[in-house]
Image (tube, helix red, strand yellow):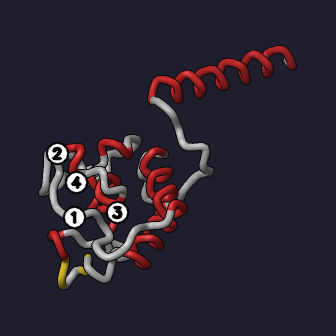
């Protein structure tokens, strides 16, 4: 019975590692809850992206941000705002890192009057890499 557990663990471990390799590099970050991303949005973005005065027609208010960004097409280019599992193909992440014009986007980097910290960017990137779950 003990031998079977070891084999099972190896199979599960290999399958997990193989899946990560096939998807590309994964963040070393522990699981990121969407509430952490909402915290970044609340501190840095919501003042311009509110339901009653949404710049770029994008609202990022707590309780409504997830449905407004995940698997939603960008109005500025042919890319999803957030493509789960792929920050580089997520227009929102590209706007936050000021790499949107390299991908064919336009306009200013966001937030408009400041830059997110490296920690805030890692939270958003980790959340997207981990599947952009609403958790």
As drawn, 126 above or below 42 = above
Q: Name the residue under label 2.
A: 104
Residue visible at 46% across and 30% down?
24
- The mark lying in front, picked from 3 and 2, is 2
x and y percent of residue 29 in the render?
60, 49
**Cα distance in 3D space between marks 4 and 2:** 17 Å
Residue visible at 65% across and 24% down?
12
In the rendered image, which quarter contains the N terminus? top right
- Asked whether 8 or 69 is in front, the reply is 69
x and y percent of residue 73 in the render?
18, 51
Task: Report whether residue 135 is seen.
Answer: no
Q: Name the residue under label 1.
A: 108
CB of mark 4 within 8 Å of CB of mark 1?
Answer: no
Work out whether mark 3 precedes mark 1 in sequence or the reverse, and give the earlier one: 3
As drawn, 49 above or below 106 = below
Q: Is residue 14 left or right of residue 48?
A: right
Q: Mark 3 points at which residue?
A: 66
Q: In this view, does 119 lie to the left or right of 68?
A: right
Where residue 32 sits, quadrant-wise, is bottom right
**Cα distance in 3D space between marks 3 and 2:** 24 Å
SS at circle 4: loop
């Amino acid at each position: 019975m003990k031998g079977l557990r070891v084999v099972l663990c190896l199979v599960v471990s290999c399958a997990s590692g193989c899946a990560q390799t096939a998807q590309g590099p994964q963040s070393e970050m522990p699981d990121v809850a969407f509430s952490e991303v909402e915290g970044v949005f609340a501190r840095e973005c919501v003042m311009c992206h509110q339901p009653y005065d949404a710049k770029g027609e994008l609202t990022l208010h707590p309780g409504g941000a997830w449905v407004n960004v995940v698997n939603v097409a960008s109005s500025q280019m042919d890319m999803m705002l957030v493509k789960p599992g792929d920050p580089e193909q997520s227009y929102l992440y590209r706007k936050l890192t000021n790499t949107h014009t390299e991908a064919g986007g336009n306009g200013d980097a966001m937030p408009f009057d400041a830059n997110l910290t490296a920690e805030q960017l890692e939270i958003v990137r980790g959340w997207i890499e981990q599947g952009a779950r609403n958790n």
